[in-house]
């Protein structure tokens, strides 16, 4: 009987140790294989996006537009989620934390920085599309590459500063919020995070895209009515507007998927039912947020022809050729 009780503890030699909640080995294997595949797939896909935008320089204004620089920043944050956050999240699904209280406190900085960076990048992308569709004449002057680089830099600085200010209290005495030894628990202001990380940015994103949707529909109707009237003069304008509308529609899909992945977690936090949910359910909600980082590059592959072409060049190793960054066809 004593041996059985010791076997159920995370640390049998410590009386205050947490108890193990064993699950069938087959279930554990399936969960770890699935989550490991998603993590590797997230890293691989976002790495393709980063290489596609950063490496290929043919038609500079096509691959290095302000919008794509924002997509590059989003891909970097998604890449870090797959590389650093998802593997640790798999460890949090287990009842025992073996890496120590300090590593537990430091770990939570990673998802806070990367996830908040994804949210801020989505806001910047929404603002970018809003100006491109609603004020196209001033877009090139308002969204220069220099300004976008500064915005991206400020985004990451803010996310790092926000995370440290939000979680610094947990570093003063790591593990003081654990109810037993071998647990990984932190203290944070849920209401504060809910407002700054979800309600305010999501409200901004939804309002901007509703405005973009209304303007895009009106522009589409205007194009259909005037395309035959001034055929020669409007041919270039129509092409430009079609590309802008396509970009707005694609990024609208990205935002919709973003909301579908983030809303369940924050809605549970808003209702306060996270205190009554089990560890597995909460872990699933967290992983759903991180899974958005895997879906974004899939959306790019479906809607962006230049991304599909660059993937072909990368997979076939043509990227290793001399002057591959000037390859035509992107």
Image (cartoon, grey):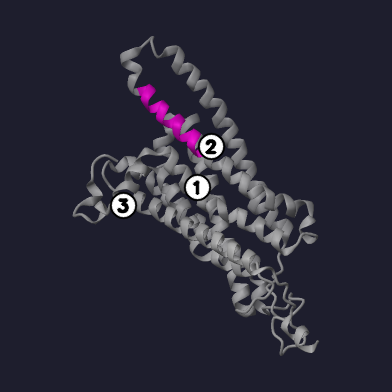
x%, y% of residue 232? Answer: 30, 14
Cα distance, mark 3 to mark 2? 27 Å
Give the numbered dot on residue 314: 3
Rendered residue at 67%/78% (across/down): 174
Cα distance, mark 2 to mark 1? 12 Å
Question: Quadrant of the image for the C terminus?
Answer: top left
Give the numbered dot on residue 252: 2
x%, y% of residue 133? Answer: 48, 31
What's the magenta region?
A: 237-252
Rendered residue at 64%/58% (across/down): 286
**Which residue occupies the foreground of this view, 142 or 326?**
326
Q: Do the residues bearing badges 3 and 2 touch, measured as CB atoms within 8 Å?
A: no
Cα distance, mark 1 to mark 3? 19 Å
Q: Is residue 201 left or right of residue 125?
A: right
Label 3 CA crowd tier, 10 Å (few <14, some 14–19, many 20+): some
Residue behind mark 1: 296
Kind of element beneath mark 1: helix
Q: Nearer the viewer, mark 3 or mark 2?
A: 3
């Amino acid at each position: 009987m004593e041996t059985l009780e010791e076997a159920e503890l995370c640390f049998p030699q410590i009386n205050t140790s947490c108890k193990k909640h064993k699950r069938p080995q087959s279930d554990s294997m399936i969960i770890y294989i699935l989550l490991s595949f998603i993590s590797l797939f997230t890293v691989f896909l976002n790495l393709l996006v980063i290489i596609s935008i950063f490496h290929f320089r043919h038609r500079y204004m096509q691959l290095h537009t302000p919008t794509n620089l924002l997509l590059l920043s989003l891909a970097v944050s998604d890449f870090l989620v797959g590389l650093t956050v998802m593997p640790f999240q798999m460890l949090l699904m287990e009842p025992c934390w073996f890496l120590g209280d300090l590593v537990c406190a430091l770990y939570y900085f990673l998802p806070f920085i990367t996830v908040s960076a994804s949210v801020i990048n989505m806001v910047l992308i929404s603002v970018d599309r809003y100006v491109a569709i609603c004020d196209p004449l001033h877009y090139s002057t308002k969204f220069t590459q220099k300004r976008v680089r500064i915005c991206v830099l400020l985004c990451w600085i803010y996310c790092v500063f926000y995370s440290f200010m939000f979680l610094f209290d947990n570093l003063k005495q790591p593990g003081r919020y654990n109810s037993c030894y071998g647990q990984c628990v932190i203290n944070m202001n849920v209401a504060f995070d809910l407002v700054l990380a979800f309600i305010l940015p999501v409200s901004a994103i939804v309002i901007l895209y509703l405005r973009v949707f209304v303007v895009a529909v009106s522009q589409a109707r205007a194009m259909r009515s005037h395309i035959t009237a001034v055929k020669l003069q409007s041919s270039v304008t129509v092409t430009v507007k079609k590309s802008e509308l396509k970009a707005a529609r694609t990024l609208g899909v990205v935002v919709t998927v973003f909301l579908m992945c983030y809303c369940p977690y924050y809605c549970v936090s808003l209702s306060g039912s996270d205190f009554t949910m089990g560890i597995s359910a909460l872990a699933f909600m967290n992983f759903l947020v991180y899974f958005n980082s895997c879906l974004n590059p899939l959306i790019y592959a479906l809607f962006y022809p230049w991304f599909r072409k660059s993937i072909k060049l990368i997979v076939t190793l043509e990227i290793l050729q001399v002057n591959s960054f000037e390859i035509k066809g992107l």
